[in-house]
Amino acid sequence: MLTKREKELLEGVELSFMFTIDAERDHCPHGKTYHGMTMLPHALDFCTDHEITATVFCTGDIARKFPDILKEVAKNHEVGCHMDHHEPLVPNEYDNRVISQQHAERALRAATEALRAVANPLCFRAPYLAFDDRFIPSLIHHGYHVSSSVPASHSRGLAVMGEITEVCVSASLSLNPLLEYHVFSLENLMLRGDSLLRGLFDLLILKYCTVPMLPVVFLCHSWELTTSALCAIRAMLDTFPDTMRFDTVSGFSRNLHESLKARL
Ligand SMILES: [Zn+2]
C-alpha cells in the first residue's frame, strides 16, 4: 500500500500514538442514550488484541451508571476524567451553556469522586475540546497531572502549564450519519472511508515526523467504534506496524518529563 519513497520516509521512525476514547452519554446521531457503553468493551478487546493501551476519558455520570464496565476498563487501560455530565468549561458551538467557575469546580469534584471508585484518574479532557486556562488550579487541586483538552490546530503544541502538561488532540474519528465515518485531523483535513489511511499517513509524515517530540493523539467516542471503524483502524495498524508506539496520555507525559529531566 505504501510507495517505496514512503517506506523510506518511515524507516526508523517511531511515533508516540495515543488512542483515546471519550465515554459519555451518546450524542449525534444516537441521541440521549448510552449505546456507546455497550460498544466500549468490544472496542477495548480490539485494543488489547493489538497491544494498544488506550486512555478512556469518562464522565462521572458514566462511572456511576456503569461501574462494572469501568472496572474492567481500568484493568488494562487508563481512565481519565471528562467532567461529570459533560459540562462545557466555556460556551462553544455545540453547547452554549454558561456555567460558573463554582459549578465547574463542583462538577469536577463529583466526577473525580465517581472515577476514584474505579481508578485514580491523572488525566483530564475538557468536553468539546474547549478548555479554559483558569481551570488549571482546579485540576491541580484534584490531583490531575495531564490535560488533553485542546485541538492541535488551536494550540501551543505540547505545553507544560505549571504542574499540568497539555497533550493536544491531533486527529479524530467522527461518525457522520450521512457519510459513514470520517477522520479529520484537527488541522482541517477531512477524510472518510478509504481516504482514512491516506489521511493519517499524511498527517503522520507531513506533520509529526518533522517534529519528533510531538505525539499523535487520536480521539474517538465509544459509539463511533463500529465494526467498520475498527476494520479501518486495523488496516492502519497493519500499514504502520513498526512506526507507532502506543502509550496512555499520562504514560506519555511521564516519559516526556523523564526525558526532559535527563537532558537538563
Ligand atoms: Zn466529550
Image: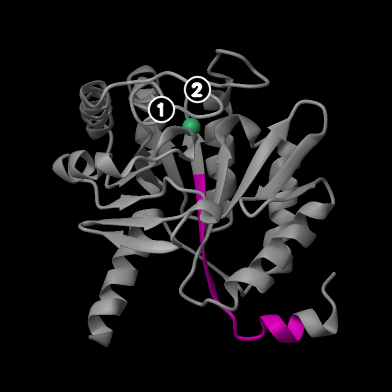
Residue at image coords 81%, 84%: 5
Task: Read off the residue under disc 1.
Answer: 88
Does the stretch in magenta take in 15? yes
Does the stretch in magenta take in 133? no
x and y, in percent, of residue 62 in the image: 40, 23
The count of marks equals 2
Q: Is mark 2 within 8 Å of ligand 1?
A: no
- Amino acid carrying mark 1 in the image: Pro
Vertical comparison of 131 with 176: above or below: below
Task: Read off the residue under disc 2.
Answer: 95
Q: CA distance from mark 2 to mark 1?
A: 7 Å
**Residue 248 relative to residue 99: left or right:** right
Residue extending farthest to the left is 141
x and y, in percent, of residue 131 in the image: 39, 40
Residue at image coords 69%, 44%: 230
Marks 2 and 1 in Cβ contact (< 8 Å): yes
First in sequence: mark 2 vs mark 1: 1
x and y, in percent, of residue 88 in the image: 40, 27
- Counting other residues with Cα less than 10 Å from the Cα at mark 2, is it few (<14), some (14-19), or many (20 or more)? some
**Which residue range is magenta in the image?**
7-20
